Image (cartoon, rainbow, N blue to C red):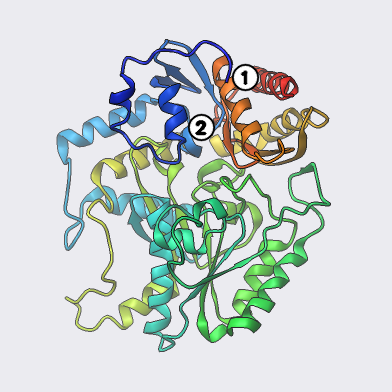
Amino acid sequence: MKGVKYMSKFSRAELEAYWMPYTGNRQFKDDPRMIAGADGAYLIDDRGRRIFDGLSGLWTTGLGHCRPEISDAIANQTRKLDFAPSFQFGHDGAFELANRLKDLAPEDLNYVFYTNSGSDGADTSTKIARAYWRQRGQPAKTRIIGRAKGYHGASWGAISFGGIGANRKLWGQAMEADHLNHTQVATDLFTRGMSKTGGELAEELHEIVALHDASNIAAVIVEPFSGSGGVIIPPEGYLKRLRDICTQYDILLIFDEVITAFGRAGSMFGAIEFGVTPDMMTIAKQLTNGAVPMGAVIVREGIYQTFMDTGGPDYMLELPHGYTYSGHPLSCAAALATLDIIEQEQIVGRVKSMSPYFEEAVHSLKGAKHVGDIRNYGFAAGISLNHIPGEPARRPFEIAQRMWEKGFFVRYGGDNLQIGIPFISEKHEIDSFFNALDEEINRQD
C-alpha cells in the first residue's frame, strides 16, 4: 500500500504479543488499524476518525454500536448476578430468553440450547444430530453434509463440513463429511435477490445419498445465504427442495442462521424469509448485537423429546454436552435487550422496506472496473472482483484498505468484498458508502 502509515502507540514488538485471528499478522503489525470506540453506525479509530461500519462489526451490530439500552441491561445484570453455573442450576434470564426465542422461531422449533458462538453452535447442532440417531437406534448415521463455500465457524467440526478451502487446507481431515456444490453459478451473474434458475442444484443431494447411503448420513447443514463465502444467495426453490429430500431420506436439516437471523434477510429468520423450516437452527452474532458473545441452537420438539424419552432415570444427563458460559447471565441480559429493540423499533420491517434502495446502490457498481459479479439479499451483498494474475486476494485487500482510509469499513475475503450494512443505515450513508467504493474500485490498475 502506498501512502503515509500511521504510527501506533504500541511498538512493533508489543504488537507481536497478540496473535490475531483471521488476519495477515505481518501486514497488520507493519500498518495497524486500531479501533478505539464506536457509536451507532460508525467505528472510531485511534485517530478519532469516524468509520462507517459497512459490515455491522462482523455481521453482529445491526442495531448500531454502544446501544445504551443494551449497555444498561448488561451493567444492571452485573450488579445482580454476574455468573451462574449452567450445569444443574438455572437463572431467570436464561428461561426468559429461551421462551422469547421459542415464540419468534418457526413452528415446532421450541427448544433452545445455549452456546458461546456460531462455531460451537455448529458443533453442538451436529453433535445433537449424531446423538439423536444413536438414541433412535441408528448409530451408523454419522456423516454430515455441508456445502462448498459454506462457513460454519473455525472449530474442528465446522472446518470439516464447512466448504471454504482456505479454512481447511492447514488442518487435514477432522470428521467425516461431504459437500454439495455451492449455488453461485458462473452463467447467472448480477442477480438481484434469488435467481429464478438453479433450484435444481439441490438434486445433487440424491447423488450424495447414493454414494454414502442415507443410513450413514446424520444431517445436512447449510446457511440460508452465506456471508463469509461471498454472500451466495439460494435460487428459488432450492432450500425447499433440500427440505423435501432430507425428509424423504430421513436426514436432519440444519440451518446455520448466524448471519441471517434477526433481520439481515428482511425477516426474523432466514427460515421464515424463505418459507422453509429446518430441524435445527444455529444462531449467534446479532442475538446480542455483538455486545457479549452468545450463540444458541434451536431444536424441533421431536429431537428434544427423543433425548428425554431415552435419558434413563430423571437425575441422569440426557445430553452430556455444554459450556461453562452457556446461557451466561450477561449474555441473556444483552440478548433480551436486543430483542426488545428489534421489536420496538420494527427493525425487521425497516430492513425489508430499505432493501430495494440498498439493492439499487450495490448494483450501481455493475460496469465498474474489475467487477465480475454482484449478489444481494436484504442488507447483505457480495461483490466478486476479477483477479490480479496469481494473486486473487490482492485486489479486494487493497480496495478495503483504501476504503478504511476514506472512512468506510468493507470486509474482504478471497476474491470478493462482503457488505452487511447496519440495519439503522440511512439513505445518505448508503450513497456515500457506494460512491466511495465505486471510486476505489475504478482506481485499481
Residue 436 image point, x, y percent: 67, 18
Is residue 229 found left or right of 305 in the rendered image?
right
Local crowd at mark 1 within 10 Å, few (<14), some, or many (≥20)?
A: some
Residue 166 image point, x, y percent: 54, 51
- Residue 326 versus residue 222: which sits nearer the camera? 222
Report which quarter residue 78 is drawn in: top left
Q: Residue furthest front?
A: 390
Residue visible at 77% across and 29% down? Answer: 365
Q: Residue furthest bottom?
A: 137
Q: Is residue 32 visible?
A: no
Is residue 338 found left or right of 376 in the rendered image?
left
- Residue 207 versus residue 37: which sits nearer the camera? 207
- Residue 187 versus residue 76: which sits nearer the camera? 187
Please name the residue that numbered disc 1 is placed on.
Answer: 429
Q: Secondary structure at mark 2?
A: helix
Q: Can you say whether 25 is above or below 159 in the image?
A: above
Q: What kind of residue is marked 2? A: Ser
Residue 364 image point, x, y percent: 78, 28
Q: Secondary structure at mark 1?
A: helix
Please name the residue that numbered disc 2 is placed on.
Answer: 56
Residue visible at 54% across and 35% down? Answer: 346
Q: Earlier in the sequence, mark 1 or mark 2?
A: 2
Residue 253 image point, x, y percent: 55, 68
Mark 1 touches mark 2? (CB < 8 Å):
no
Residue visible at 30% across and 43% down? Answer: 331
Q: CA distance from mark 1 to mark 2?
A: 13 Å
Residue visible at 32% across and 14% down? Answer: 9
Report which quarter residue 384 is drawn in: top right
Q: What kind of residue is marked 1? A: Glu
Q: Can you say whether 215 is above or below 401 in the image?
A: below
